[in-house]
Image (cartoon, grey):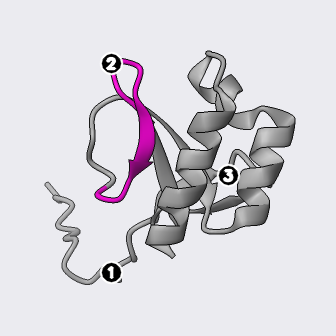
Amino acid sequence: MTTNTTTKKHQPITPRKQPLRRCVGCGQMKDKRSLTRINKSKEGVINIDPTNKQHGRAAYLCLDHACLQKAKKTKGIERSFKCAISAEIYDELAKQLEVVL
């Protein structure tokens, strides 16, 4: 009787796949770590999540003011969060994006 003694010892190590997310401004798929996470909490508060660990629904945006303006124009963040977003929130996001940059 022959047994199959194949082991996984000699298989090459493959690098882990990096998670990809789509920017709501430009629509490009990028590495999750290179994007800024915008979070909407259960209370409805929308802010930039610098730790990428806050609870709630998230949308991702490039670290670029042009992407924020494009997301505002095309209502990309509103579609992600399924709610209307006022101009004050966009201004606050722009200020928080300045701090991140």
Q: Nearer the viewer, mark 3 or mark 2?
A: 2
Disc 1 crowd rating (10 Å Cα; few below 14, some 14-19, many 20+) is few
| Image disc number at residue 90 | none
Mark before the other along the chain sequence, 1 or 3 = 1
Relative height, residue 48 to residue 18 (above, below) = above
Quadrant containing the N terminus is bottom left
- Relative depth, front residue between 15 and 78: 78
- Relative depth, front residue between 3 and 94: 94
Residue 100 appears at what percent x and percent y? 45, 70
Task: Tell me how far mark 1 sits from mark 3, CA to CA.
Answer: 31 Å
Q: Amino acid at mark 2?
A: Lys
Relative height, residue 32 to residue 69 (above, below) = below
Q: Which residue is mark 1?
A: 13
The answer to whether residue 50 is magenta is yes
Identify the residue shown where x is 60% and y is 56%. Answer: 94
Give the magenta part as a residue range: 40-51
Identify the residue shown where x is 21% and y is 61%. Answer: 4
Q: Quadrant of residue 65?
A: bottom right
Q: Is residue 53 left or right of residue 72?
A: left
Q: Which residue is mark 3?
A: 23
Task: Tell me how far mark 1 sits from mark 2, CA to CA.
Answer: 41 Å
Q: Amino acid at mark 3?
A: Cys
Disc 3 crowd rating (10 Å Cα; few below 14, some 14-19, many 20+) is many
Q: Are marks 3 and 2 in contact (CB under 8 Å)?
A: no
Q: Are marks 1 and 2 in contact (CB under 8 Å)?
A: no
Q: Nearer the viewer, mark 1 or mark 2?
A: 2
| Image disc number at residue 42 | 2
Residue 57 appears at what percent x and percent y? 43, 29
Residue 92 appears at what percent x and percent y? 53, 47
Identify the element where label 3 is drawn.
loop
Q: Is residue 74 left or right of residue 98?
A: right
